[in-house]
Amino acid sequence: MQYLEKWENDEMRTNLIVSCVFLLSLFFPFQVHAQTQSQVVILNQVRGNECCEQGSRDAVQTQLQAVQQHQLPATFVLRYDALQDKAYTNILQLSPTLDIGVFFEITPRLAADAGVEYRGTQEQWYLARHAYLVGYSLEERKKIINTLMRLFYQVYGVYPKTTAAWMIDAWSLQYLVEKYGVVAHEITRDQWGTDSYTLYGGPMGMMYSPSKRWAMIPAQNSQALPIKIFRQTLPDPLWNYGDTTSSTTSQPNDYALAGKDISYFKNLRACSKSF
């Protein structure tokens, strides 16, 4: 928790987390889904001005300018309160290089508009049973998803192709695919006991098609959902195992707190060539 507390105080985490998700092919020279070329996804999670980690329009503007300056394709996923705020939606518009999606982080206002009871508090908003779809019944999940998607359509005139939530269930993924045509979803990295839950043992840094029964498990053919899952940041391929601090990752706060710099990634790349 000491890493989490330090990160909460870092102004970099205002309203977005830049997720550079490196596929496993970056580190290991075998084929992943018939792909041999490394890929990077730049995804920014945008929070608005409701409770639960308020966002910053200035930070979004800075990130947008950076990807535009370097002509990088990027995705911005907006939380419900950001979708309701023209300060965010006016500067984030669909374009050939800019993908806009939905960030499924549940806030009191989203729950109320969906007709769902919100059982969290401002102090405990981040707990999995409050912030994520897994904490709600199937009927409640459907209402929350429909409410968010309806607002997105009102703002942008289309349904999003990309969604994000640090954890999600297979039922919700299937509903997003079948009803709204979502093709990609971001979950968080492997982590141990962070933000009240543990995600551990899934494919590390690799894009995959999830099982219809459990989103952490890759599947093939009829057992797979027609959607790609990718992870937020990448755990260290060596030191992650057995690390209950969940701090050996490519997240900026993790390698910065460990006294590392950009050379850390260069070493990872060099190490991958020895496999």
Image: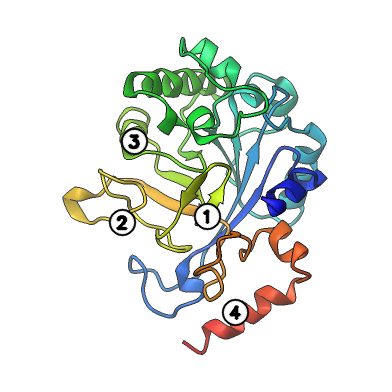
Q: Nearer the viewer, mark 3 or mark 4?
A: 4
Examine the rendering and report whether any part of residue 74 can be seen: yes
Report which residue position mark 3 lands on. 177
| Nearest to N terminus: mark 1 or mark 3 | 3
Closer to the camera in the image, 82 or 67: 82
Q: Against 80, is 59 above or below?
A: below
Residue 236 appears left or right of 53:
left
Mark nearer the viewer, 2 or 1: 1
Which of marks 4 and 3 precedes in the sequence?
Answer: 3
Asked which quadrant contains residue 257, the reply is bottom right
Q: Are marks 2 and 1 in contact (CB under 8 Å)?
A: no
Residue at the image position 79 percent from the left and 40 percent from the top: 59
Q: Nearer the viewer, residue 180 or 232?
A: 232
**C-alpha span from label 1 to label 3:** 29 Å
Q: Secondary structure at mark 1?
A: strand
Label 3 packing within 10 angstroms: few (<14), some (14-19), many (20+): some
The residue that label 1 is drawn on is 192
Asked if the residues shown at circle 1 and circle 3 are in contact, with their CB atoms under 8 angstroms apart, the answer is no
Q: CA distance from mark 3 to mark 2?
A: 16 Å
Q: Nearer the viewer, mark 1 or mark 3?
A: 1
Q: Quadrant of residue 44?
A: top right
User: Sequence order check: which comes first, mark 1 or mark 4?
Assistant: 1
- Give the CA separation, mark 2 to mark 4: 25 Å
Q: Which residue is mark 4?
A: 269
Residue 70 locus on image (x, y percent): 73, 57
Distance CA(mark 1)–CA(mark 4): 25 Å
Considering depth in this image, is 62 or 69 the residue closer to the camera?
62
Disc 2: which residue? 218
Q: How many marks?
A: 4
Q: Secondary structure at mark 4?
A: helix
- For the residues carrying marks 1 and 4, which lies nearer the camera in this image? 1
Mark earlier in primary sequence (3, 2): 3
